[in-house]
């Protein structure tokens, strides 16, 4: 017996799932985590991302943060591409940054989502509220990941 294909969740439904999954979660500055998700989704949209990438942006931290399981993701009414992007941008415990960057680069559509995520994470306004040691550590971490992904400062992709 074959499974009947389901209509993928609408953008509004994906947003609602992500907001519910991250309800009560805050970022390092104590802000509601949904603000970060919204900023990444909006960053993907502004960079020309399509609906599948925007859906992945809303869900980009859900599996990594244990808010939704991989099993939920696999069974969700999402396109295969959206699921693949979410899995590509999900860091695994102990995973070297080079392996993570390689997976992002190898997954069609994932780089744009990670680019928007890094841009929001590295926003000087967000970082300014953190203590100096944390701000320095995160700034260096984000710069290293941008370099591994071939992104130049400011978030634009470098020449191939």
Image (cartoon, rainbow, N blue to C red):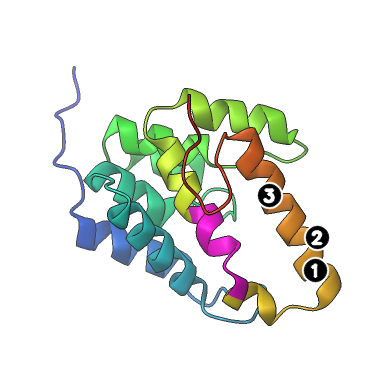
Is label 2 in a helix, a strand or a loop? helix
**For the residues bearing labels 3 and 1, Cβ distance under 8 angstroms:** no
Q: How far across and down, in percent of the image, does residue 140 sit?
A: 76, 54
According to the picture, the residue beneath numbered tag 3 turns out to be 143
* Residue 1 on image: x %, y %: 18, 17
Residue underneath mark 1: 134
Q: How many labels does the image show?
A: 3
Left or right: 70 in relation to 2: right
Mark toward the viewer: 2 or 3: 3
Q: Is residue 122 above or below residue 2?
A: below
Label 1 close to label 2 by CB (< 8 Å): yes
Mark 3–mark 1 Cα distance, whole angstroms, equals 14 Å
Residue 119 painted magenta? yes
Report if residue 46 lies within the magenta region: no
The residue tagged with tag 3: helix, strand or loop?
helix
Residue, disc 2: 137
Task: Compute the Cα span from label 2 to label 3.
Answer: 10 Å
The stretch of residues the image draws in magenta is 117-124
Identified at 61% across, 43% down, the residue is 146
In space, the residues marked 1 and 2 are separated at their CA atoms by 5 Å
Using the rendered image of the protein, determine whether residue 67 is visible from the camera's viewpoint: no
Q: Which residue is drawn at 56% across and 73% down?
A: 25
Hey, which residue is sitting farthest front in the picture? 159
Residue found 48% across the figure and 68% down from its top = 36
* Looking at the image, residue 82 lies above or below residue 13: above
Label 1 residue SS: helix
Q: In x, y percent, where is residue 125?
A: 58, 77
């Amino acid at each position: 017996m074959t499974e009947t294909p389901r209509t993928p969740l609408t953008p509004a439904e994906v947003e609602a799932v992500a907001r519910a999954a991250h309800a009560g979660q805050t970022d390092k500055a104590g802000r509601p985590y949904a603000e970060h998700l919204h900023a990444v989704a909006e960053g993907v949209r502004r960079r020309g991302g399509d609906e599948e990438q925007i859906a992945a942006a809303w869900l980009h931290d859900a599996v990594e943060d244990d808010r939704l399981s991989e099993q939920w993701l696999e069974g969700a009414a999402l396109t295969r591409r959206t699921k693949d992007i979410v899995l590509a941008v999900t860091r695994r415990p102990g995973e070297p940054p080079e392996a993570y960057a390689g997976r992002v680069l190898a997954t069609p559509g994932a780089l744009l989502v990670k680019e928007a995520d890094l841009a929001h994470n590295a926003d000087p306004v967000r970082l300014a509220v953190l203590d100096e040691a944390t701000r320095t550590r995160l700034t260096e971490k984000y710069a290293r990941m941008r370099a591994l992904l071939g992104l130049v400062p400011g978030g634009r992709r470098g020449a191939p």
